[in-house]
Image (tube, rainbow, N blue to C red):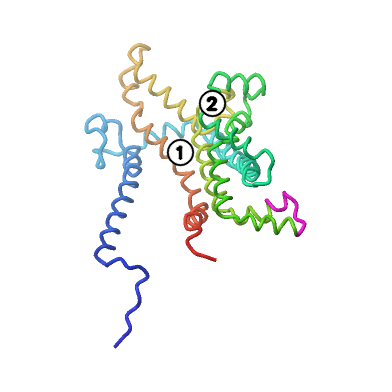
Amino acid sequence: MKNKKRRINTVSRPAEAVMHLILAAFCLACILPFVFVVIISFSSQDSIREMGFSFTPKSWALDAYTYVVKLGQKLWISYFNSFFITIVGTLCTLLVTGLYAYALYRKDFKFRRFFTFFCFFTMIFGGGLAPTYVICKQFLGLSDSYAAVIIPMLLNPFNIIVMRTFFQSSIPGDLIDAAAIDGSGEYHTLFRIVVPIAKPGIATVGLLSALAYWNEWFIPMLYIRDSKYYPLQYLLQEMQSKVDFLSRNSSVIGAEAAVRASLPSDTLRMALVVLIVIPIAFAYPFFQRYIISGLTIGSVKG
């Protein structure tokens, strides 16, 4: 009699099949909206006017992407600005956040409670837009530069709490004490011992920071006037605003009916979503294995 392979879990096969169907339906519900956006971006404006948004448009067109490509060099400069701001900003954020969180993690730090309260307090109460603008614009002189976008988003209290909590849950205090007995300095302990262990937490904070920098358009609107520093999101948002303005006020400014009909106002909005989402989506595979290991930490006893 052949030995049957032992099942790893104790869930019955029918229950497991139902769970797989539920998860598959959930994945499909997450993917379908983006597929729908892509289809609309390739639909013709006439088809949308006649049928509305549909998975099977009456006719296809590249008007929205053609309209974006007409930007030429400005588009590629904005792509470079967004990548540069996202990469540099994320690295700087991880450095500052890691240093702050490590100090809060160390129980022998004298002012640990004060800086923990200071961090938590800023999560609840903020200075507001006007004081922030005055500090950044007039006091710090942040204007028409990459620093004008990176510095205001450099430190996020939520990321500090996340990283500190990860340090507390994954790095035993005895390991820090053992490193100190061996003569390891604070910076050596942080970068050679703590950071390799805390890679999942660092990857999680890095992903959150990268998404925040990549999707930001409001801060460039406040501090950037020179178009050579426009990130992609602000450039495309400005383009969408112009198209919407022309569509709403074409009769007032005397635009011809043919010109009004050629403006891809609906499809352009979806095309901009595709252009913004696709580049940052490629970042997920680089963070995935660290995030998964972070979710499963502690499940296996050493």
The one nearer the camera, 179 or 6, is 179
In the picture shown, does residue 13 fall above or below 138?
A: below
Answer with left or right where residue 275 lies relative to residue 59.
right
Dot 2: what SS?
A: loop
The amino acid marked with disc number 1 is Ile
Position of residue 245 measured from the top left corner of the image (x, y, whole percent): 39, 19
Dot 1: what SS?
A: helix
Position of residue 27 measured from the top left corner of the image (x, y, whole percent): 33, 51
In the picture shown, does residue 228 fall above or below 253?
A: below
State yes or no: residue 185 in magenta.
yes
Q: Residue at x 70, y 59 (%)?
A: 178
Q: Residue at x 49, y 32 (%)?
A: 233
Answer with left or right where residue 79 lies relative to residue 237.
right
Q: Which quadrant of the rendered structure holds the C terminus?
A: bottom right
The amino acid marked with disc number 2 is Gly
Instruction: Tell me which numbered mark, 2 or 1, is placed earlier along the sequence.
Output: 2
In the picture shown, does residue 66 fall above or below 31?
A: above
- Magenta span covers which residues? 182-190
State yes or no: residue 145 in magenta.
no
The residue labelled by disc 1 is 276
Q: Farthest right residue?
A: 183
Q: Residue at x 64, y 25 (%)?
A: 142
Position of residue 120 measured from the top left corner of the image (x, y, whole percent): 55, 34
Which numbered tag is attached to residue 126? Answer: 2
Answer with left or right where residue 90 lies relative to residue 252.
right
Which numbered tag is attached to residue 20? Answer: none
